[in-house]
Image (cartoon, rainbow, N blue to C red):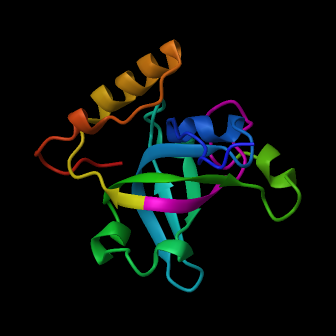
Amino acid sequence: MSSAPLPTRLVLLSDLPALPAGEKVRLLGCVTGYDISTGTLTLKHAYPSSSATDCPTVDVDVNLLLSTLKSTDTQIGEWVNLMGYIQTSEDGGKKRNRSRAGNGSGQGGIVRLQAVMLWSAGSVKLGEYAEAVEMRKGVGMGEGMNHLSQPSEKLPV
């Protein structure tokens, strides 16, 4: 058995409900909330849907990162890159069948991640990012997308 860490899978936020607990993922999301009392960051990314009601959401436990987390990383509207593990829900997985992530399939579920790394994405060309992730999924790749970050204005969710 190897002691090497699991490889990270580059995914879109809307892909999370279909992935198993324990999967290590990297994704991009926009901060829409931060609960300081629980150390939970809420991220959204309205891809593939443009409707606010279909906007996939994920709750991220950032307690392991509190000593390195910057205040700008928790500001509403900030785009962040995240690496972490998909967690099982506290009720044994029953919540994962209810629609909250709202990906339009009715199988959104409540998805929680345990963050192991989080950093600002800066300004990102969201359309190009999502296209590139979709293309990589088609060829089975999951490497980083750093070349898509470019100085420009902040984008809405």
Q: Position of residue 16 (x, y in %)?
A: 62, 41
Q: How many marks?
A: 0
Q: Position of residue 4 (x, y in %)?
A: 60, 47
Residue at point 77% right, 56% down?
Answer: 88
Residue at the left extreme, as displayed: 151
Displayed quadrant of residue 80: bottom left
For the residue pair 26 and 106, the one nearer the viewer reads as 26
Q: What predominant SS class does the magenta segment belong to?
A: loop
Residue 133 in the image: above or below residue 152: above
Residue at the top extreme, as displayed: 139
Q: Position of residue 49 (x, y in %)?
A: 48, 32
Looking at the rendered image, the quarter that the N terminus falls into is: top right
- Let me know if residue 103 is in the magenta part: yes
Q: Position of residue 96 (x, y in %)?
A: 78, 48
Displayed quadrant of residue 114: bottom right
Q: Which residues are magenta?
A: 100-117
Residue at the bottom extreme, as displayed: 37
Residue 8 in the image: above or below residue 62: above
Residue at point 38% right, 29% down?
Answer: 130
Residue at point 74% right, 41% down?
Answer: 20
Residue at point 61% right, 43% down?
Answer: 6
Displayed quadrant of residue 150: top left
- Let me know if residue 155 is in the magenta part: no
Please give left or right for residue 135 compared with residue 124 in the image.
Answer: right
Residue 74 in the image: above or below residue 138: below
For the residue pair 15 and 46, the one nearer the viewer reads as 15
Please give left or right for residue 38 compared with residue 94 in the image.
Answer: left
Residue 129 in the image: above or below residue 36: above
